[in-house]
Amino acid sequence: MTTTGQPAPAPSLRSTAGTGYLAGLFVDALGSGLYLPLTVLFFHQVTRLPVTSIGLGLTLAAIAGVVANPVAGVLADRFGARHVVIASYLARAVGFACYPLVDGFTAFVAVAALVAVGDRSYYAANSAYVADLAEGAARDRLYALVRTARNVGFGLGGLFTAAAVEFAETSGYHLIAVGNAASFLIAAALLAGTARRTGRGRRADPPRADSPSLLGMFAGYRRVLTDRPYRRLVLAELAFTVAHQIFPLAVPVYAAMVLDAPASLLGVLFTVNAVLVGAGQLAVLRWQRTVRRTHAMAFAGVVFIAAFGAFAFTAVLPAGVAVTVGLLAATLLFTLGELLHTAPSASLGAGAAPSSHRGRYLAVYQLTWAVSAILAPAGVTGLVSANPQLLWLAAAGIVAVASLTVLRLAPRLPVDAVWPEPVGDGERRAGSDVRALVGGGRPARR
């Protein structure tokens, strides 16, 4: 995939569709935040199934969700990403409304699978819908707003969860299930009510031309798999998504078992991470707006590597205040790496996908999160138990390879995907320090 020339000026976000979409997304996150802090306990209290059965059921449901991912990509290309997002909201609304009715393992797996299918379909179609709504730098901003809205919604939902469980006890869990189902219905209604047409007569959810047969629609994935630059980008993204899993999976075990840190400190670290991820996305995006997305991702990799080194270094610090400060510094670095990676990664994946097959391309791109969620738990916990320092070394190694890969891909991806927006002379001077950090230099005007 090679292109030449300068990216065209980025149009602004299609505000009518974008406002309804973001409002629905916030309501969705608010409802999801009701149960996410208590996921296994929530299912145990609502269904009365043993915790071991819940774990097995959620694993089976996750497999169904992974299968749904490529199907969602096909449907997004065929019927428009907006319709698939709405369908994913409705599927999860039905699923959560049914949880209080579950009376056995089979019913639990069926309902959990429906919710998992809705979840994975949502993430695949949502990326394509954002790409339909906005282009260029506006797309970066919208991806950042999406992440901010979701984090704020999750945080507020968690607060409501504490109140519901505290004052309503067991019935509070049923209220959470019903509340989450209602949030998905509201989100679907808000998105369904958005304008179908946006600026310049462009539809926000255009269906793609495709073969009418089911086999023909899935055959479109051959184009994704034979697109060598995009395939390499997906593999690099997989390494970054594994890196994202390090903090929730490895840090608690490492801090408690290796550093003998108090459990209360873990709560502080996770709160710091959540608050900064929610509050810092737009600020970081402004810093990145004149930087090649490939180079921004590579710089995120450098920060991740520094964070892994900081976590490893805490093992040689004296117990007590020094370890606390070391863990806090490492957490801040890790959070910065997350912020630096997220928006340019999403926009690069969307921009490098041809519009005719964008749903399928982004379904494959989003599948990296599902694959890392399957692979990372066993790998991370195994390494941290066997040799914690080896974990940090391995994590740094895969991120270093991923960072070098995206740097080498920069000339082989569409210029509109690599660059957020054209830069004038004044902006060029203002952004020179940033570009010096991540390897600036803009293609010459043609």
Image (tube, rainbow, N blue to C red):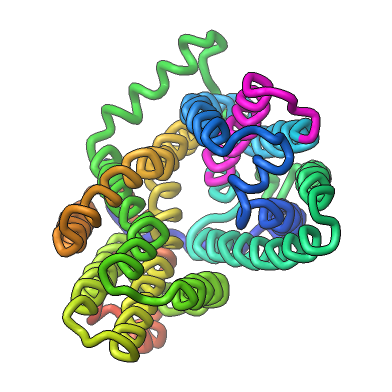
- Front residue of 272/40: it is 40
Picture residue at 40% right of the left edge, 43% below the top = 373
Picture residue at 65% right of the left edge, 33% below the top = 49
| In magenta segment, residue 116 | yes
Picture residue at 34% right of the left edge, 87% below the top = 325
Q: Quadrant of the N terminus?
A: top left
Chief SS of the magenta region: helix
Instruction: In the displayed orientation, state which residue is furthest to the bottom.
Output: 321
**Is residue 32 in view?**
yes
**Is residue 416 in view?**
no
307 lies left or right of 45 = left
- Front residue of 318/403: it is 318
Q: Quadrant of residue 163?
A: bottom right
**Could you tell me residue 324's position as x and y percent?**
35, 84
Number of numbered discs visible in the structure rendering: 0
Picture residue at 48% right of the left edge, 60% below the top = 136
| In magenta segment, residue 338 | no
234 lies left or right of 400 = right
**Could you tell me residue 152's position as x and y percent?**
65, 67
Q: Quadrant of residue 218?
A: top left
311 lies above or below 6: below
- Front residue of 18/49: it is 49
What range of the chain is rendered magenta?
100-127
